[in-house]
Amino acid sequence: MDRFSSRTLLWAACSLTLAEFVTYGFSRSAPVVVLAAVLMKAPATTMYTMITLKTVRSLVSSNLITTGIALVSTSNSAGIVLMQNLGGIIVKRTSFQAFYRIMACVIAGIMLLACFLRTKDDGTVFG
């Protein structure tokens, strides 16, 4: 994890998530969707966790890392609730495939914004 920059990890995680959402949005085959979930979800989630650790480590002092991670986790949970409500509205008005296509566009936008991301990757998380 310390060998890769935050930007590289973010691009890798977003690429996996984008591939997953595109698969969900355009495939009607259940085995393909299941295979995409199995192959892409766990690595992407692990990378997002690594990004969180690196970001919190670079932003807060060493005695507040646990508090920082707890704050990120709380914010993440609140965001999940909001996205589930928004997703429910989108799915109710359109379809699951349309929802995942919209989410793929959101991830593509995040990847575009990541091009301009400036982080300091001078500290190590494990070391």
Image: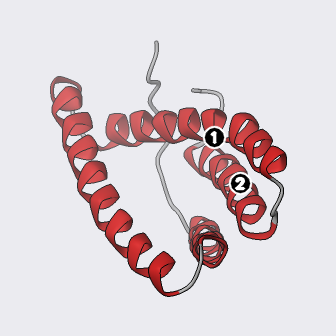
The residue identified by callout 2 is 20
Q: Where is residue 75 shown, x and y percent of the image? A: 24, 52
Mark 2 surroundings within 10 Å by alpha-carbon count, few (fewer than 14), some (14 through 19), many (20 or more): many
Please tell me whether mark 2 sits on a helix, a strand or a loop. helix
The residue identified by callout 1 is 41
| Quadrant in the rendering for residue 9 | top right
Left or right: where 39 falls relative to 17: right
Residue at the spot x=21%, y=46% of the render? 74
Residue occupying the far top of the picture: 127
Report the front residue among 24 and 67: 24
Q: Where is residue 87 shown, x and y percent of the image? A: 43, 71
Mark 1 surroundings within 10 Å by alpha-carbon count, few (fewer than 14), some (14 through 19), many (20 or more): some
Relative height, residue 83 to residue 123 (above, below): below
| Quadrant in the rendering for residue 104 | bottom right
Relative height, residue 53 to residue 125 (above, below): below
Q: Which mark is residue 1?
A: none
Report the front residue among 47 and 18: 18
Report the front residue among 1 and 62: 1
Residue at the spot x=65%, y=34% of the render? 43
Relative height, residue 64 to residue 118 (above, below): above
Amino acid, disc 1: Lys
Which corner quadrant holds the N terminus? top right
> Do callouts 2 and 1 mark residues in contact (Cβ within 8 Å)?
yes
How far, Cα to Cα, is label 2 from label 1? 8 Å
Left or right: where 105 falls relative to 60: right
Amino acid, disc 2: Glu
Q: Where is residue 12 shown, x and y percent of the image? A: 70, 47
